[in-house]
Amino acid sequence: MNRITEFLFEAMLLKRVQRTGYQFLGPGKESVAEHTFGVMCIAWALAKLSPEADPGRLLTLCLVHDLPESRLGDLNYVQKQYVVANENKAVDHMTQGLPFGQEIKALIDEFNTGQTLEARLARDADQLAFLLDLKALSDMGYTAPPKWATHVQARLQTSVGRDLADEMAQTEWDSWWLKIFIDRNTPEQ
């Protein structure tokens, strides 16, 4: 149980590991754990839209996809031009002695290779989470996000992911809130 407890403490560290790409956007920040939550919400929706996918597997892939960042940190695209992270070594060390360590390694490998439907959907959920953040910042008047969105959209691998991205682009980030506000503040006739 000790090794499992240590693993859980390590996983919780992701609440304090900040994603580094936001420094190029100006506003906004999020931890890796916050990102993972968003990815899982999106993956759940993608699973509902993709009945041929295994939702449990999809959610599990999303849950573990960034676990190595507890050891590596979050390297953005510029940093990756100069620093080579040894993710395999980090995963090997992280999972060593865990009764479910081989399962975690296999899931991370599946996510990274993107060969299964669930892995492609999980990778899309990862990108869609970023697109949601970019769209919200853009809707708030920040000018940097739109120039990033096309590059992120180009990484989508599934038709359902592309369809959801198209809808995101057409929906204002606060439309759900405004509908509630307007509904509650419109006089009845």
Image (tube, grey):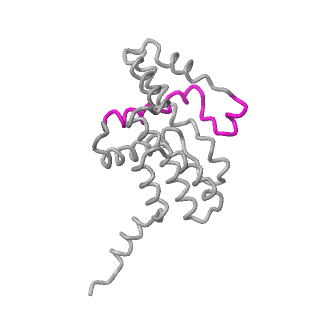
- Residue, x 41% and y 15% (percent of image)? 98
Q: Is residue 2 found left or right of 52 in the rendered image?
A: right
Quadrant occupied by the N terminus? top left
The outermost residue toward the top is 97
The outermost residue toward the bottom is 189
**In the displayed structure, would residue 155 be above or below residue 171?**
above
Q: Is residue 82 magenta?
A: yes
**In the displayed structure, would residue 2 be above or below residue 66?**
above
- Residue, x 53% and y 58% (percent of image)? 135
Quadrant occupied by the C terminus? bottom left
- Residue, x 41% and y 41% (percent of image)? 121
Q: Is residue 57 found left or right of 95 in the rendered image?
A: left
Q: Position of residue 176 (x, y in %)?
A: 39, 65
| Camera-side residue of 187 and 21 | 21
Q: Position of residue 159 (x, y in %)?
A: 41, 49
The outermost residue toward the right is 82
* Magenta stretch bounds: 56-83
**In the displayed structure, would residue 119 be above or below residue 22?**
above
The answer to which quarter of the image holds residue 182 is bottom left
Q: Is residue 67 magenta?
A: yes
The answer to which quarter of the image holds residue 184 is bottom left
Q: Position of residue 118 (x, y in %)?
A: 38, 36
Q: Is residue 68 found left or right of 81 in the rendered image?
A: left
- Residue, x 46% and y 27% (percent of image)? 108
**In the displayed structure, would residue 159 be above or below residue 67?**
below
Q: Position of residue 137 (x, y in %)?
A: 57, 59
